[in-house]
Amino acid sequence: MIAPTNLKKMFGQIDIYLFDQLLRDRMAPGSRILDAGCGGGRNIHYLLDAGYDVCATDSDPDAISGVLRMAADLNASLPPTNFRREPVEAMSFEGASMDVVLSIAVLHFARSDEQFEAMLESMWHVLKPGGLFFCRLASNIGMESRMVHRRGRRFLLPDGSERYLVDEILLLAWTKKLGAVLLDPLKTTIVQDQRCMTTWVLRKVL
């Protein structure tokens, strides 16, 4: 049994909803996993340590440098080319090369419908048929009246930030457009007086 004091060392700051996917065996050992818009890499600490074939992209060079250091510290024997400084909408990984694509707190930074679509289609392009797409993003679900419209799908949230917000209709429309299977019902966490975060989990069919 693992002592509770060791859990943070093992799993880092992994998103609890991503941890749930691991518990349900949706990410087979050795899978090739892309964290698109990885930031500081909090969601790939465990994956690197557990021997997954991890890839990551971010437009921030400091983020990629940090992930490379993390991989070295964990003795992950992965080529540096797995970690690329590039925007999500212009990733250079080959099509259908990933078993899993993670998009955690990324899509709500889209500045327009066009950028949102470009990011989503870029991630979908690199995902293999049968692959898992795991996404967490800001929405207005459950707090519709609290969001102040700015332009398009950009809204001011109660926490003072401005984000591109999705809703149930849009996510289900994209699920259909992508020809995907919704693996879980949409699940939204409402953070009191701050924001709503929705979990969107798809299986690629085509």
Image (tube, helix red, strand yellow):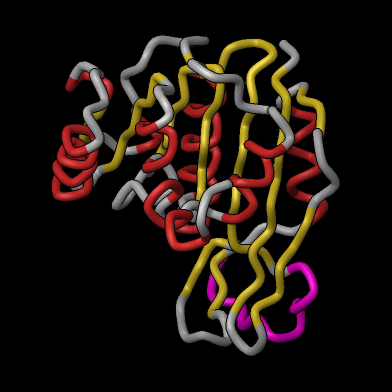
| 155 lies above or below 18 | below
Magenta includes 143? yes
Name the foreground residue: 15 vs 132.
15
Q: Residue furthest front?
A: 1
Name the foreground residue: 172 vs 26.
26
What is the number of callouts on the image? 0
Decide if residue 161 is in sight here. yes
| 97 lies above or below 62 | above
Residue 95 image position (x, y, % from top left): 46, 10
- Left/right placement of residue 4 relative to residue 36 reads right
- Left/right placement of residue 190 relative to residue 12 reads right
Decide if residue 111 is in sight here. no
Residue at image x 77%, y 21%?
A: 179
| 164 lies above or below 20 | below
Name the foreground residue: 187 vs 92.
187
Residue at image x 60%, y 62%?
A: 138
Magenta includes 136? no
Residue at image x 72%, y 11%?
A: 206
| 96 lies above or below 140 | above
Tell me which segment is drawn in magenta: 141-151
Q: Quadrant of residue 69?
A: top left
Name the foreground residue: 110 vs 77.
77
Residue at image x 26%, y 25%?
A: 76
Residue 192 image position (x, y, % from top left): 66, 86
Residue 127 image position (x, y, % from top left): 55, 18
